Amino acid sequence: FVDSHITTIQRNAVMSWKALMERVEVWLVGEEPGVEAAARELGVNYIAEVERTSSGTPRIDSIFDRLRAQSNAQYLCYVNADILLFPDLLISLDRVIESTDRFLLVGQRWDMNITTSLPIDQNWHAAFLASFKDHAKLHPPAGSDYFIFPRTEFQEIPPFAVGRIGWDNWMIYHARRSHMDVIDCTGAITAVHQNHDFRHLPGGKKHRRQPESLENVNLAGGRQAMFTLANANKCISDGKVAKPRFSRATLQREIAIWPLINLRPAWLARLVYTLANPKKVAEDRKNEKRMKENIAKTIKESS
């Protein structure tokens, strides 16, 4: 809450969460400049101290642990602080609870340029949602900005750095490996990302070009654990939890990841996956090499 644009979009996001009414507890986490003051001003809960990586970045596992210690909420929702949320989140959660008790809700976001404060009150969403698609673009299904799950799930999480790639993919991977319902809520939950630059990251480079992103991937168990929304095994269709529409691509993906989600121990799962998917493994190695090269450039340009 220092940069004027970031302050504006984060205030918009927090106010949209508060507008979800008394069913929702809102918590801001972290000791970064302005966070505590913003929490007081906006009337939301605040957690100051969390464990950090060697580079000083807050850790996802510590965030979840601190929240569980201070909140009795039955369901937890992690959401990035630039994301607007709407009542369809609670509607979708209620529908999911009726059909399953072990789940992870994820979905694509909409990207939108917003530079001013939004007039957010209890009914603000009606006018906004009526026209926002004229100015927004659906983000590719490669990253997730919100996760909703029962508080009893994800009790043990690697010490991932927040705001870097890899940990969101691991959430989907772990949920599938734990035989949870991973539910793609893209068509049911509206999440609007307010676009911004990356001045807050070293060298002003995107998160995928940061050294801690590579560390996150390694903590997750490697490239084979980089699951995406394409690996969801459920979706919300016509207001109901259902299996995704069958296709050859869906079947091929499920066959490919079968060892990863079913075999124990993890080393055996990775071995069988590697033997069964040589082309995908080779592609992953190329991507990892490219990632390392880009990270090396970021380190050089930042030094």
Image: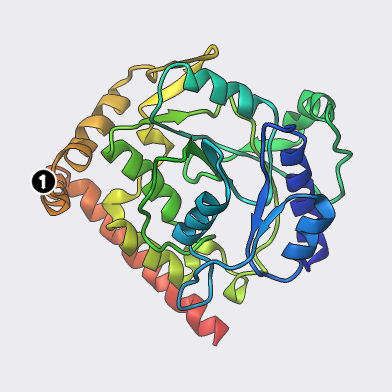
Residue lying furthest right in this view? Answer: 119
Q: Position of residue 274 (x, y in %)?
A: 15, 50
Name the residue rendered at 18%, 37% in the picture: 262
Q: Image check: 99 left or right of 128?
A: left
Using the image, determine if residue 239 lies above or below residue 103.
Answer: above
Name the residue rendered at 35%, 39% in the picture: 175
| Any part of residue 27 in sight | yes
Classify residue 153 by image quadrant. Answer: top left
Q: Could you say whether the residue bearing mark 1 is in a helix, strand or loop?
A: helix
Residue bearing the label numbered 1: 272
Q: Image check: 100 left or right of 70?
A: left
Q: Position of residue 229 (x, y in %)?
A: 43, 36
Which amino acid, mark 1? Val
Q: Position of residue 259 (x, y in %)?
A: 16, 40
Q: Image check: 212 left or right of 255?
A: right
Classify residue 91 by image quadrant. Answer: top right
Q: Position of residue 71 (x, y in %)?
A: 57, 47
Using the image, determine if residue 206 lies above or below residue 293.
Answer: above
Name the residue rendered at 50%, 71% in the picture: 52
| Any part of residue 113 in sight | no
The colour scheme is rainbow
